[in-house]
Every structure is written in structure tokens, then in C-alpha cells.
Image: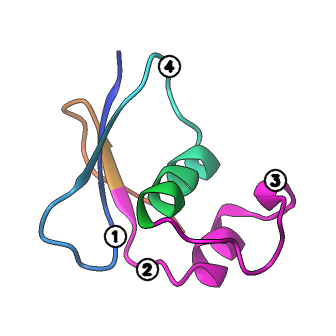
Amino acid sequence: MPLYQIWYNDADQPLVVNTPYRLRDIEIAGEIIRNEQRQNRQSADPSGLTVRELLRVNGLRNVRYTLDESEPVELR
């Protein structure tokens, strides 16, 4: 089971997500939005947005994550 540690908005502690499958970048953005209990201001259906657009409309910045023990990956 993949273990994700997700940092965003210069937070000191990561959001930790353990899933039964690997997440796509758009799903990682969705995990952050669910954690923050934000409503997507652009669209009720975020599936039409790119990762960059989804992060922008929800005010998320400096998003990066690690998968298990991997090097950090930055979402743009």
C-alpha cells in the first residue's frame, strides 16, 4: 500500500495519505482539497481542470509529495 506524504502552502507537517493504489497527480490535489474541506471555486466537477488549474483555483501553492521513501516530486 503506497504511503504519500504531501506538503503544501509551506506547512511544517505533511498530510499523510495511505491508499491501496498509486495516486495520479490530480488525485493528490483532490486529497489536499478534501483535507482542507475546500469547494472547487472553478467548477463543481474538477475532472475538467488540469492539476495546475485545480491548485490555482483552490489557493494551493508549493505542493510536493513523496511516495513511500522516494525523492520529493513537485506538482506544477
Say which residue label 2 marks: 61
Distance between the alpha carbons at the discs numbered 4 and 3: 19 Å
- Disc 1, disc 2: CB below 8 Å? yes
Say which residue label 4 marks: 21
Distance between the alpha carbons at the discs numbered 4 and 2: 25 Å
Identify the residue at image location x=69%, y=72%: 40
Distance between the alpha carbons at the discs numbered 1 and 4: 22 Å
- Classify mark 1: helix, strand or loop: loop
Residue 58 placement (x, y as % from top left): 59, 78
* The N terminus: image quadrant: top left
Identify the residue at image location x=87%, y=59%: 48
Distance between the alpha carbons at the discs numbered 1 and 3: 21 Å
Residue 63, located in which quarter of the rendered image? bottom left
Amino acid carrying label 2: it is: Arg
Instruction: Judge by depth and name the residue closer to the eye, 50 or 18.
Output: 18
What range of the chain is rendered magenta?
37-64
Identify the residue at image location x=59%, y=39%: 24
Q: For residue 8, which numbered disc appears in the image?
A: 1
Residue 3 placement (x, y as % from top left): 29, 29
Residue 52 is left or right of residue 69, and the answer is: right
Residue 28 placement (x, y as % from top left): 51, 49
Q: For residue 18, which numbered disc appears in the image?
A: none
Instruction: Judge by depth and name the residue closer to the eye, 44 or 6.
Output: 44
Mark 3 or mark 2, whichever is nearer to me: 3
Distance between the alpha carbons at the discs numbered 3 and 2: 19 Å
Query: What's the magenta bit mostly, secondary-structure-wise?
Result: loop
Mark 1 or mark 4, which has the lower sequence index? 1
- Classify mark 3: helix, strand or loop: helix
Amino acid carrying label 4: it is: Tyr
Mark 4 or mark 2, which has the lower sequence index? 4
Q: For residue 47, which numbered disc appears in the image?
A: 3
